[in-house]
Amino acid sequence: MIEPLWLLLGLLLPAVASVAVLLATRHRRCPAWLSQSGPSLAIATGFVVGYTATYGTPVFPPVESQQWLLTAVLPATLIVSILGAINTVPSPIAWIGRLALALGTPPLLLQSYLRYTWSTGQAFTWIASLGVAIATVWALLSRLDAKYAQAQTPSTRWWPLLLAIVAGGTGIAIMMSGSQTIAQLGLTLAAVLVAVLILPGGSDQRTPRSSPIDIPFAVLVGLWLNGYFYAELLAWHTALLVLASLMPWVGLIPALRNRPPWQNTAIRLIATAIPIIIVIATAAIRFNREMTDYYG
């Protein structure tokens, strides 16, 4: 059961902190790269505040999976995102960093499986498969964001807000699968994304080099891995949540691309929501059945 105090410390406070960072990076004296990295810095800050509200002071050196997410994956992703926003840094440098993160995140977060559960062959198969999958989805999301960043209408430039729905749905699904604390991180991410991306400069003034999706995607990957491997999130639930993050692509289908903005927005929203609704509904049925069996 989520405590009322956590709603203040784990949702409202992270949102306020992220907005404060975003506004600070919008000061006219800030260098261009810092202003363009503002959304990523703001989202990362908000998530750290929410993590602290959920788990307490970060532990270093990290031991558990969620600790590695905060102390290793998140900072590395932020560095990659900032490099991508600096015009003098070649674009391939940032993409090399994203590829390294895609391949390096699974072994960091799944160390207990590497040490105690998997054989060498199983470890190689799992880590390689997960790395390729993460890199592929990341590339697809980045390509999608680059296309939408070139548009001139808010309905397309604010598409990353749909990731807030994915984050919230992920949190609810994980909560019904056995881990409230991991689930709370998903809810924190959703709150921070909404707070940052609805503000002027949070999403509507970015360029293809200053994508705000790197941080939320890295956190979502961490939540999906934690949910599946440590919280009994079903495999097909995880797959549907990943699919939901990619559903905004439907807005670029030729038959839908030229529809009025409100229609295109509604289509993307519905397409994103459908997989999440299926996951939450079936997870709720499973949770209620297990509770009934447990309590008789």
Image (cartoon, rainbow, N blue to C red):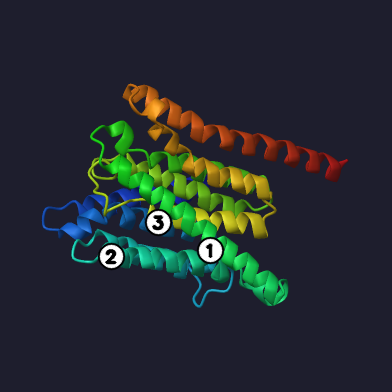
- What residue is shown with label 3? 215
The CA span between labels 3 and 1 is: 17 Å
Q: Residues within 10 Å of mark 1 (few under 14, many from 20)?
A: many
Q: CA distance from mark 2 to mark 1?
A: 21 Å
Mark yes or no: residue 112 visible.
no
Q: Secondary structure at mark 3?
A: helix
Upstream in the sequence, badge 2 or badge 1? 2
Is the residue under label 1 in contact with that under label 3 (CB below 8 Å)?
no
* Residue 161 location, quadrant: top left
Residue name at image x 39 percent, y 45 percent? 193
Q: Nearer the viewer, mark 3 or mark 2?
A: 2
Q: Is residue 244 visible?
A: yes
Percent coordinates x, y for residue 260 in the rendering: 32, 21
Looking at this view, name the residue that lies furthest to the left.
29
Placement of 285 over or under 176, stated as above or below? above
Residue at position x 51%, y 63% from top? Answer: 56
Q: Quadrant of the C terminus?
A: top right
Q: Which mark is residue 131?
A: 1
